[in-house]
Amino acid sequence: MSEIEGDAAERHDPQITSPRPWSERSNTVGILPGGTTFQVDCLVQILGQLPAARESNLLITTAMGEAIETSADELCRRQLSPMGIVVRIGEAWHPTAFSRQWFINTSNGSALAVHLHNQCKFIGELLNEVGDNTTQADLLRAARSKYVLSWEKQDPIRRRLAWLRSLGMVEIWGRKIVLTESGSTLLAKLTLATSEEAAGQSMSDPKANSAVQKASTVVLERLLAITPSSLINRKEPIGYIPRGANRSASGSVATRLTALEGLRKAVGLIDVGATVDEFRDSADRELGVGAGSFNSMLHSLRHLDFIELIAYNKYGPTELAYACLAVGREADLIRFLHSKFAFIGELLEASRDLVSTSQLLAIARSRYQFSGENSEIRTRVALLADCGFLERFDKSRSRLTALGEELLSELPLQESSLVPTSSNGAAADDPESEERDPSMVATEDILNRLQTFGTIGSRDKEFEIAVRDAFEMLGLRAKHISGQSDTDVLVTADLPADSRYSAIIEVKSTSQGSVPEGQINFEAIKRHRKRNAASYAAVVGVKFPKSVMESAASNGMAVITIEDLSSLLQEHSRTPLTLHQLRNAFDPSLTNLSGLQESADSLKNDLALTAAIISVLQSEATEDDPEARGSASPANLRFALRSTDLPFRPTSEQIVAKLNLLTHPTISAAREVRGENREILYAIADDPRNIARRLRALADQIEVFASREDD
């Protein structure tokens, strides 16, 4: 029996919620499998199978008897959640209070239609636009001109008509849409939005509530997952947010957008899904985003986790975008940004007194090792001010509001480590003029937590989270699951399908100095591995007796001690291994992660050889030898490298491979020159410090454009 079938004794009409303000209604109306007249029947089948785990599938039988199996998470998240039909609680989808009551009497189509009107834009308004000889094109024009909906194609109209036809409110005769008697009766009941209300909505003004709204489930999960380590390891660049001309549906230029309006409008352009070309065209038309800026905007929205691929070359908003960008949910936007990006809540804390952008940048650099530029601080201030948590006094100064004070009280903040700074924000009195690498700080924090919680025996959850953070630091996508019926941690290597792999991690803490065999249920681990379709399984603990290691190997599972994992983390922080190389960590035939040592040594040699070649070329450039012209051949380099501290003798092939890398325009560390007899020689192309800065800049850009789920 489903959750809502259990309510069948309550035979009364569902409680209809009052209409939401137009600005808060969803642009999206979902579409279900089975055809345009099958929407209500399909919904009944789905509700009968709820609650359903996110990873489960739902079974639907169409009117033609065809059986369809579809992902519960995809269908509920993308199609039903925006309409207020389902809600996600934890890792499962549940019917909303309205859906539970409506399911008891599904013949009450009027109640469902009223609910859809109250939740979604242009439902009753569509019915009101139906007259003599009305077509879908007419309805699209009305949506754009009267209700300022920036729809380009008829798909949003078709979706609404599918539900209204299935509910018996309209019929379609050829190309003409006709209102039925039921539709006319329904229309008389509805409170319709006026075109003035729709056109005059302000997307930037938060609701004038005296209290900060409670966090939605999807955002609350991110807040609860924050740890001291994750705060230190947050990303810095938010990226490009369109702020160009705000054009109305008719194409006329209105006003310049705020940062918050820019985010909302950019995501709203693909509310029903759009190909890259369609998105580019609408961004140019509606936002004034040219071809040169479009890719930056696309990468930023993906980096923000606000859009995702929903089909080949087609993007749509994420569940997170709906949670954060709805009007009235400004607090959720800032909560999410704080969980993912550095110096968000910390900026609020630093703004208790009137403070300028340049002062905020100095605070960010000195106290939180922030390496971003002034533009990143301005973006943060703009979003916080748009959401009502900062108030501006002039172009450069702002201060915390009462609403900001309330939100700040619930945000876990990164610990401040004050370092005296010079006027430009750089660390002062530092003999090496280098700030401490935040990733090293994060690594040390994880190492401490592994050792502390792994040997207590009563802090299982903290140990599991530390293990998750350790594998995430290695570059794997790591998820803390826990629970008796599932694994503790699931890690995935986000590689192409032919080389992708995943592993379940069973985490065992103990105060006994060694994990006893009785604490490990190998059969349960096998079930967990099958449940998650994982490629590998591993057990992590402080130490393991020989019997456990033998049993694990015979069951095809790797055993990883805290000492081995800590050593791997320390090695990885200096010379990061690739995801392909890290696969060996889960090989049950290898002990003490021995399969990774050769890879680590090879990588260290590669990096050392590259640096040594730059050093030799720099030395050649400073020598006063008019014949050599400050250059060297690969053979000369091989000879010269013998006098360096390299731990190995490189081959000619290895040297040439590194020279090919260093002469690439992106690196620009070396250049080819012609010697006598047209021999190819190599010379330094830039100061080594500039080369290092360029590589760091490349690393920063990779961080900006990387698009990977972090939760």
Image: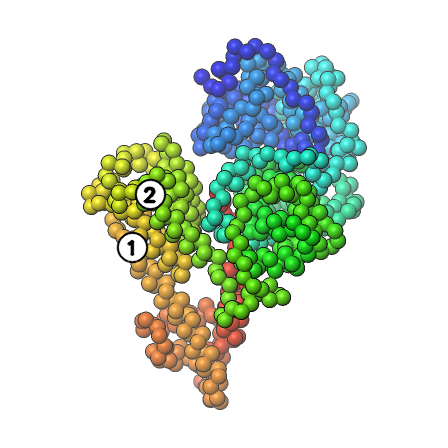
Give whichever of 156, 666 is nearer the camera. Answer: 666
Q: Residues within 10 Å of mark 2 (few under 14, many from 20)?
A: some
Residue type pointed to by label 2:
Ile
Q: Residue at x 51, y 25 (%)?
A: 94
Q: Residue at x 42, y 47 (%)?
A: 469
Residue 316 screen position, x and y as percent: 59, 40
Any part of residue 57 in sight: yes
Say how the picture is coloured: rainbow
Tag 1: amino acid: Gly
The x and y percentages for residue 276 are: 60, 46
Q: Considering only vertical position in the picture, is 274 above or below 35?
A: below
Crowd around label 1: few <14 · some 14–19 · many ≥20 (10 Å): some
The percent coordinates of residue 86 (x first, y second) are 55, 26
SS of the residue under disc 2: loop
Whether residue 556 is visible to the viewer of this picture, yes or no, is no
Residue 456: mark: 2
| Quarter where residue 453 is shown | top left
- What residue appears at the point 32 percent right and 71 percent down from the top-left corner? 647
Q: CA distance from mark 2 to mark 1?
A: 30 Å
Instruction: Please tell me in which quadrant of the rendered image residue 331 appears.
Output: top right
Observer-side mark, 2 or 1, equals: 2
Residue 169 drawn at (x, y percent): 68, 18
As drawn, 190 above or below 249: above
Task: Give the quadrant of residue 601.
Answer: bottom left
Q: Who comes first in sequence, dot 2 or dot 1? A: 2
Residue that numbered label 1 is attached to = 595
In the image, 432 versus 165, the foreground residue is 432
Relative depth, front residue between 540 and 41: 540
**Looking at the rendered structure, which numbered label has been put on residue 80?**
none
Query: Is label 2 in contact with label 1 (beta carbons under 8 Å)?
Result: no
